[in-house]
């Protein structure tokens, strides 16, 4: 039986992953080594019981007892805390799903790769933070990373049988998020509730807000660079309000291979679950005659300053990705907590990057895990200071 572990099983990607595992036979078809989640211990326990998981972990120590209670009598092992999540990655499995949100997904992902098996990677933050380390760890252990972000899965699929030398450009699409049709001057007043609803995709709150600000696309551009090893100037972003074309790969003979499909993450998750085969998946089939037309436009850099920040980060290299992601995470915390406005998130990240790039060490420091973690902490604390400056 195929051994699987899901990090972040209670989130949006996690729940979709569980749905596919269940449809493909559940506990009878998969040996579920571990499931990890957060505060929603009721859901975590329900998933663990249904799939007969061997281990269930909440990342919050204070949730340990509630999880233990919810799993009483099941025989399922219970653990709690960040170390317990990392320890779950040390248990061998054939397929790991990395669906924790934020840089917290980095250590479990790295440890999973050390088994030399397959890591299905939804956690884009780990690639932005530590792309070269993640890819090198995969290579060193003969492990495979399969992209789960819809755009990156689309690119991966368009590249089957192709050589990277023949690739001229990669285009990822963006819906434009919740505010794509708002007047520019209104953006500063956008509320948390407004930013937390997405026109096309049903996702976790953080990535939904990041879609409205295009920080999600900024992370994804860097993700393309790190995963496919392509030069930044060959990566383009196209606003496509329908979210049906997920990405396009342009080749040197002028061909453009597009990947189309319904806005349903179960396609990308299912592709990574069944790769290199294609299995029947429960996603809607597109009726293009009914859809009639697809729209595309260039992103407006004033509306979406995050995209230019991603260019600066790629240009700087080194630990800039770690700084960028961490500053973004802290700025997003600030927006969620009501400390800063919607457009101030980009202002915070810009300020932190500017100052850190002006100091030595960001681009020249050794690219190892210790320095990456230190930079993550430093950028978060600088972002906190910048938020205080803005507020005073
Ligand atoms: P989510 O907020 O719905 O779920 C996050 C999961 O991670 C939950 O299980 C939560 O308990 C767990 N978690 C949160 N903080 C944690 C921590 N500090 N340590 C350990 N576990 C923690 O998020 P999501 O929308 O499912 O996104 C997960 C990842 O997938 C993100 O990296 C996101 O960018 C990426 N992604 C999501 C979608 C989508 O459709 N939701 C699409 C593409 C990529
Ligand atoms: Mg995406």
Image (tube, grey):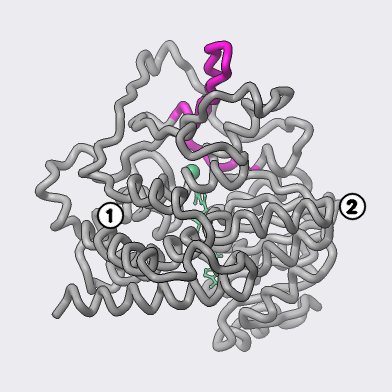
Q: Residue 288: image x %, image y %?
A: 45, 15
**What residue do we see at 32% from left, 68% from top?**
355
Instruction: From the image, tell me which residue sits under label 2.
Output: 1
Which residue corresponds to mark 1?
195
Within 10 angstroms of label 1, few (less than 14), some, or many (20 or more) residues? many
Quadrant of the image occupied by residue 168:
top right
Left or right: 81 in relation to 203: right
At x 18%, y 56%, the residue is 190
In this rendering, position of residue 274 left or right of residue 309: right
Label 2 SS: loop
User: Would residue 28 be seen by someone viewing this image from the given angle?
Assistant: no
Residue at point 40%, 59% (across, down): 205
Q: Compared with residue 167, is residue 64 higher up or lower down, i.e. above or below?
A: below
User: In the current view of this chain or complex, which residue is farthest to the left?
Assistant: 185
- Looking at the rendered structure, the secondary structure element under dot 1 is helix
- Mark 2 vs mark 1, CA separation in Å: 42 Å
The magenta region covers: 244-269
Q: Residue at x 62, y 39 (%)?
A: 228
Please tell me how crowded label 2 is: few (under 14), some (14-19), or many (20+) other residues with Cα within 10 Å: few
Q: Is residue 294 left or right of residue 22?
A: left
Residue 230, percent from left and from top: 57, 37
Membership of 246 in magenta stretch: yes
Pick whichever of labels 2 and 1 is earlier in the sequence: 2
């Amino acid at each position: 039986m195929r051994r699987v572990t899901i990090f972040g099983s209670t989130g949006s990607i996690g729940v979709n992953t569980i749905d596919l595992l269940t449809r493909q036979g559940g506990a009878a078809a998969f040996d579920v080594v571990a499931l990890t989640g957060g505060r929603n211990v009721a859901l975590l326990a329900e998933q663990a019981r249904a799939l007969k998981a061997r281990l269930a972990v909440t990342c919050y120590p204070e949730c340990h007892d509630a999880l233990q209670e919810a799993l009483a009598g099941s025989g399922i092992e219970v653990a709690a805390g960040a170390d317990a999540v990392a320890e779950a990655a040390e248990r061998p499995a054939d397929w790991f799903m990395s669906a924790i949100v934020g840089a917290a997904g980095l250590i479990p992902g790295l440890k999973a790769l050390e088994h030399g098996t397959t890591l299905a990677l939804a956690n884009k933050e780990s690639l932005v933070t530590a792309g070269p380390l993640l890819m090198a760890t995969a290579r060193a252990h003969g492990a495979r990373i399969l992209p789960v972000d819809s755009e990156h899965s689309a690119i991966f699929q368009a590249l089957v049988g192709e050589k990277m030398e023949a690739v001229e450009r990669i285009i990822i699409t963006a819906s434009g998020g919740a505010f794509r049709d708002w007047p520019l001057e209104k953006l500063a007043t956008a509320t948390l509730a407004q930013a937390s609803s997405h026109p096309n995709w049903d996702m976790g709150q953080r990535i939904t807000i990041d879609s409205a600000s295009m920080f999600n696309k900024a992370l994804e551009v860097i993700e393309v660079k790190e995963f496919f090893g392509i030069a930044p100037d060959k990566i383009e972003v196209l606003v496509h309000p329908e979210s049906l074309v997920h990405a396009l790969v342009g080749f040197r003979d002028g061909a453009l291979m597009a990947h189309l499909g319904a806005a349903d993450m179960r396609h990308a998750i299912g592709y990574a679950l069944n790769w290199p085969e294609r299995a029947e998946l429960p996603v809607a089939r597109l009726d293009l005659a009914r859809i009639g037309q697809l729209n595309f436009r260039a992103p407006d850099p004033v509306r979406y300053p995050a995209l230019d920040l991603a260019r600066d980060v790629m240009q700087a290299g080194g630990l800039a990705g770690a700084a960028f992601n961490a500053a973004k995470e802290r700025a997003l915390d600030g927006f969620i907590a009501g400390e800063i406005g919607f457009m101030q998130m980009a202002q915070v990240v810009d300020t932190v990057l500017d100052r850190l790039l002006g100091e030595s060490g960001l681009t020249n420091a050794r690219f190892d895990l210790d320095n990456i973690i230190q930079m993550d902490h430093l950028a978060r604390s600088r972002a906190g200071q910048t938020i205080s400056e803005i507020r005073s």
